[in-house]
Image (spheres, rainbow, N blue to C red):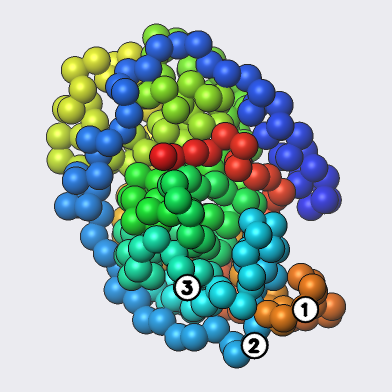
Amino acid sequence: MQISSITTTVALLVALVESQRLTKPPLQPNLDNLPPGFLNNLKPTSNTRTAYQAGSIPSDCKKIAQREGFNPADIQSWNIKYSDCSVPWVFCYHKNSNGPLNDLVDRFGRLPVHTRQFNRHIVSLPASSGHAYNDGGNLVFFGGTLSSINVHIHEAAHSLDLLGAFSPDKPLSSSAKWANEYNQDSAVPDPYAQTNQIENVAQNTVITTYERNVPGGFFGLNPNANKIFHQYATIDTEQRETDPARLLVPGGTCTGRLANSNPVPISGTATVQAAAAPEAAMPAGLATIKGASFNTNSTCFFG
């Protein structure tokens, strides 16, 4: 199957799943009891930062900024090289963002590297209320969500789901396997998970990450957690079987990367630089993760 066909198929599946609201009751009113455990147990990853090439901006960041009504000239682009991956991530940070760049770098760096590698650019834009979405592997944060570890895990979880990290079910959220396991449970994690199966998989991934990394786990926090056991267990099994080092547990180094988008001039209307070489060629032994077209903007909202 050609990449364009894969991209079209994922986009159609996302559109279908987004329209299907879930009716099972929420286990909790929200997942706001999880950040302290995450911040105490998912440690920051050391990193170095250098300014992006002068006069340029990653093409995806420019497209996102313009689509959201921002001037690309107000975006500060940074190469952030974490110690566990040889290829840096490019962060695109609006100068009027509602929190410091350090928070954005810190929170994303706390994610396990095998989760991080399925994400391309990290974008922060100012807003009066907090929300976030995932645009084809680009994590876009508005307002104070840039500092929320829950939101970072949730948005990165969309990449794991929709880019096929939970192999062989690509995407997991629209698979028969997920539907069968969901049907055996009597609840979903919270009201946000009721939105559709894409958001439900993302919230269950937040819970699975907590269960795998925080002493006592989620099942120690909520005595009724068995009501979502099959959903949790499916994600836990998938993340262990797909990646021997586990997608949701820190450790090791990146084994692949969703490639950075090409640089384009900050000024002007160009969002594609003809015949441009990839900004960071993949080193030997590092796989290029195949991208796909999707956007969760219509259903991702935190505020």
Query: Residue 89, percent across and down?
Result: 50, 71
Which type of secondary structure does the marked residue at label 1 adopt? Answer: loop
Residue under pointer 3:
95
* Marks 1 and 3, the one that precedes in the sequence: 3
**Nearest the eye: 229 or 79:** 79
Query: Residue 122, percent across and down?
Result: 51, 62
| Rendered residue at 67%/34% (across/down) | 14
| Rendered residue at 29%/16% (across/down) | 226
**Nearest the eye: 235 or 244:** 235
- Considering only vertical position in the picture, is 169 above or below 289? above
One can see residue 201 in this view: yes
Q: Amino acid at mark 2?
A: Gly
Residue 111, quarter of the rendered image: bottom left
> Which-is-in-front pick, marks 1 and 2?
1
| Rendered residue at 63%/72% (across/down) | 72
Residue under pointer 1:
268
Query: Residue 6, percent across and down?
Result: 77, 45
Residue under pointer 2:
55
221 vs 255, left or right, is left
